[in-house]
Image (spheres, helix red, strand yellow):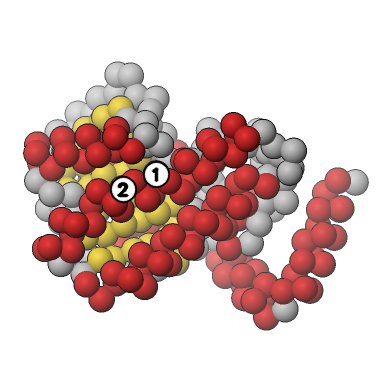
Amino acid sequence: MEITNKVIVVTGGAGGIGLALGKSFLKENPKIIVLVDINFKEFHFKNQKIICKKCDVTNELSVQNLIDEINLDFGLIDIFCSNAGILSLGSEQTSNEDWSKNWNLHVMSHVFAAKKLLPDMLKRGSGYFVNTASAAGLLSHIDSITYSTTKHAAIGLAEWLAITYGKQGIGVSILCPQAVETAMTRGREKEVSALDGMMKPEDVAIDVINAIKDEVFLISPHNEVVGYFQNKANNYSRWIGGMQKLKNRLKS
């Protein structure tokens, strides 16, 4: 999809990948970029093509109101990037509250956006979703049961949307990086997700821009991840064994 003169929304836009996406989209001459985050207080850009709005994307009514407001002020949304996320470490003993937080942010926020946006997108035969998952959704995060599980689900949702609506003008990309230099990963430079190095969010944003233009489903900024994913598919049991060894090695 061409990005020029498009209405673009990016959630999780106060920092990290989301903010980098907003700045990168600016270079493509869009109609407007709306950065969305629950943490926005006062955040202003000199460029009038980028604005900020506060929204809790885990609340369906809030997402509906946000989209209605943007549609009214700027025209129908063309590209929606569901990028908000959290990382909490834990095992099967993780509290139900943490499970709900992860599920609502990593999965249901994507669902809420699709439910609201798809009717108009399908009517005009055009629209694009970029959903941020993680390499953990293709592989695993050995220190977080909630992150691994919900990121797998996010990929499953994106696959379903692409299969169901891809021939009706709806583009879908799923972003699956390993560690990226953001507030979420600060202090975690030696964890397993950073073994192949941490990328700068600006570099990830460039990959996203290119994927949208080329309408590529899987965005894997860390080249190693595709190889790991292929190894997993080729011999699932062997891959599990390798991950068990890795977990034990990192514990020692």
Callout 2: SS: helix
Callout 1: SS: helix
Q: Which residue is mark 1?
A: 109
Please state the horizontal and vertical placement of residue 115, each as a whole percent of the image. 29, 52
Q: What residue type is disc 2 on?
A: Ala
Q: Which mark is residue 157?
A: none
From the viewer's perspective, tell me whether residue 24 is left or right of residue 218. Answer: left
Give the class, few, some or many, for how many residues have Cα within 10 Å of label 2's Cα (few <14, many ≥20).
many
What residue sits 30% from the left and 53% below the top?
A: 114
Q: Is residue 190 visible?
A: no
Q: What residue type is disc 1 on?
A: Ser
**Up/down of 197 relative to 49, above or below:** below
What residue sits 26% from the left and 44% below the top?
A: 9
Front residue of 65 and 185:
65
Front residue of 110 and 251:
110
Indicate the quadrant containing the N terminus: top left, top right, bottom left or bottom right. Answer: bottom left
Please state the horizontal and vertical placement of residue 84, each as a whole percent of the image. 43, 40
Give the class, few, some or many, for how many residues have Cα within 10 Å of label 1's Cα (few <14, many ≥20).
many
What residue sits 13% from the left and 49% below the top?
A: 76
From the viewer's perspective, tell me whether residue 88 is left or right of residue 177. Answer: right
CA distance for labels 2 and 1: 6 Å
**Up/down of 36 relative to 174, above or below:** above
Please state the horizontal and vertical placement of residue 203, each as a whole percent of the image. 43, 52
Q: Residue furthest bottom?
A: 234
Q: Which residue is mark 2?
A: 113
What residue sits 23% from the left and 57% below the top?
A: 118
**Up/down of 237 relative to 16, above or below:** below
From the viewer's perspective, tell me whether residue 192 is left or right of residue 109. Answer: right
Front residue of 211 and 85:
85
Are the residues tagged 2 and 1 within 8 Å (C-beta)?
yes
